[in-house]
Image: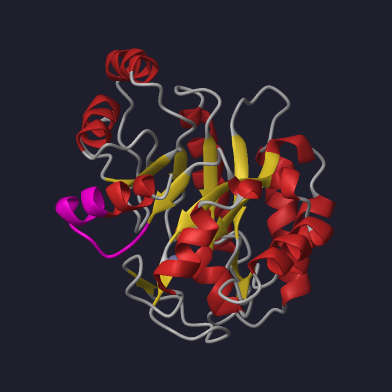
Amino acid sequence: MLIGNHLTSSKGYLAMGKMAVSLDANTFAFFTRNPRGGKAKEIDPKDVEKFLEYSKEYSFGKLVAHAPYTMNLCAAKEDVRNFSREMIADDLKRMEFTPGNYYNFHPGSHVGQGAEAGIEMIAEVLNEVLTEEQSTIVLLETMAGKGSEVGRNFEELRRILDKVRLQEKMGVCFDTCHVWDAGYDIVNHLDEVLEEFDHIIGLDRLCAVHFNDSMNECGSHKDRHAKIGEGCIGLEAMRRVATHPLLAGKPFILETPNDDEGYKREIALVRSWG
Ligand code: FE
Ligand code: FE
Ligand code: ZN
């Protein structure tokens, strides 16, 4: 099983790798830069080289990098859109230091322009920044539908994908808290939800899972993560997700409100499910 959590990238790749191993993780997520945005730290090729060796030694799975929250490819303000475009283009260059991993981002918030306009803008930027040569797969995250978030249902993600030229460079990250908050009942109807995902997007596009319980009810559109088993999804349903054959082998990333000890416990818990 591939499992890990969100790690701080400020000390570099090797430090993240060692932290992951200390938590008994074999993948991890990290922000490509400060989650609030801003300039990215210079990448140290020596550090990357050591990390790549280390990650091979410990059989790491694919990493799931996360774009900063300030990135909004469909912002109403043009300067925010331009800034976001530069950020994703730069992040994709940086991702190639560690080839063959995932880069996940929140599709964006259309801030009143309407979902269709948002979808159009998001796809337009992706068509500008994706390259044939890149080894990174870019993931659209399933969103809770808070405010004017685009990606509040599978159909919206499908419509983005349909407009992207280099579709083979694209995938989806399935966030259990977000999907539940969006109104998909993974507690009582997990098989049907996955079937619907397959029908609309295709399970071959489901590359990674953000594994979070939710503080709120199904359909609440709130997006507040809870510790595994302490939220409205609950332990049994979380276990069914983690052990579902259709999700086997995908990286599972915890984004739960925990300290290191808490993550260590949750990783051990998920591993104990087999
Ligand atoms: Fe996210
Ligand atoms: Fe997430
Ligand atoms: Zn969330």
Residue 191 picture quarter: bottom right
Which x, y percent locates residue 188?
61, 77
Give the side of residue 49 with respect to residue 172, left or right.
left
Classify 62 as above or below 273.
Answer: above
Which x, y percent locates residue 139?
60, 47
Q: Is residue 99 visible?
A: yes
Identify which residue, 26 or 147, lies in the foreground.
Answer: 26
Taking the magenta stretch, the answer to whether it contains residue 233 is no
Q: Quadrant of the C terminus?
A: top left
The residue sitting at 58% across, 49% down in the picture is 85
The residue sitting at 31% across, 53% down in the picture is 269
Residue 197 picture quarter: bottom right
Total tally of numbered discs in the picture: 0
The residue sitting at 45% across, 22% down in the picture is 97
Identify which residue, 166 or 56, lies in the foreground.
Answer: 56
Identify which residue, 200 or 65, lies in the foreground.
Answer: 200
Classify 233 as above or below 97.
Answer: below
Which x, y percent locates residue 41?
30, 36
Which x, y percent locates residue 251?
49, 42
Give the side of residue 51 with respect to residue 260, left or right.
right
Classify 49 as above or below 33.
Answer: above
Q: Is residue 144 visible?
A: no
Magenta residues, as a range? 255-265
Taking the magenta stretch, the answer to whether it contains residue 257 is yes
